[in-house]
Amino acid sequence: MTYMQMLIAYLPFLLLDVSLLVLGVYLFRRGGKYLTWAPFQPDQVQEICSHMTPAERKRMTTVAGNYGGVMGLSIAGLFAYVILGGPLAFFPTILIVWGLFLWWAKTWIRRWNKRFLASTEWATQQGISSDDIKLQSL
């Protein structure tokens, strides 16, 4: 498989990343309730987010933006490796390291989200702990 064929194969994923980035910037600029909205978000998390103070909301969006930037740069780095002609012999190793990094980052951000949501002013008043919080309703 040539590099051009690989680029063409990965093009839909690249377009998806760019469109999600544009959507994220749009929602960030709009502000309001969209900053804490996510698909499949349970009612408990929606309730906690609706009672956040402005400082808590700002902290959460900053960390979410940093996480998105790290994920975007890691995906862009993988594409750059392929496009710039990195040796294909190392590609499986790079994919394994990249996959482990994404798994670690996702695990870390889920743990951080639970602790942060439980530490908000409203959640502490309600006696909600990080173990009680379910981040997805699926």
Image (cartoon, rainbow, N blue to C red):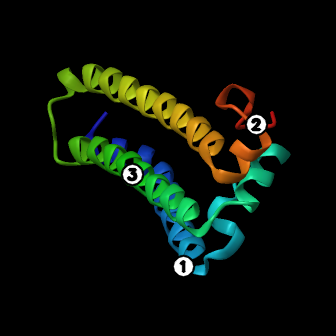
Q: Which residue is mark 1?
A: 29
Real-space Cα separation, disc 3 to disc 2, in angstroms: 36 Å
As drawn, the residue found furthest toward the front would be 125
Q: Residue at x 32, y 50 (%)?
A: 73
Q: Nearer the viewer, residue 72 or 32?
A: 32
Q: Position of residue 22 (x, y in %)?
A: 51, 70
Which residue type does callout 3 highlight?
A: Gly
Q: Quadrant of residue 99?
A: top left
Q: Residue at x 39, y 54 (%)?
A: 66
Check disc 2 and report its element: helix, strand or loop: loop
Residue 42 seen: no
Q: Position of residue 69 (x, y in %)?
A: 38, 54
Check disc 1 and report its element: helix, strand or loop: helix
Question: Which of marks 2 and 1 precedes in the sequence?
Answer: 1
Q: Is residue 138 above or below residue 6?
A: above
Q: Which residue is mark 2?
A: 127
Numbered label attached to residue 66: none
Question: Which of marks 2 and 3 precedes in the sequence?
Answer: 3
Real-space Cα separation, disc 1 to disc 2, in angstroms: 33 Å
Which residue type does callout 1 highlight?
A: Arg
Q: Which residue is mark 3?
A: 72
The answer to whether marks 1 and 3 mark residues whose Cβ atoms lie closer than 8 Å is no
Q: Is residue 73 above or below residue 33?
A: above
Q: Position of residue 79 (x, y in %)?
A: 31, 46
- Give the mark toward the camera: 3 or 2: 2
Which residue type does callout 2 highlight?
A: Gly
Question: Which of marks 3 and 1 precedes in the sequence?
Answer: 1
Q: Residue at x 49, y 33 (%)?
A: 106
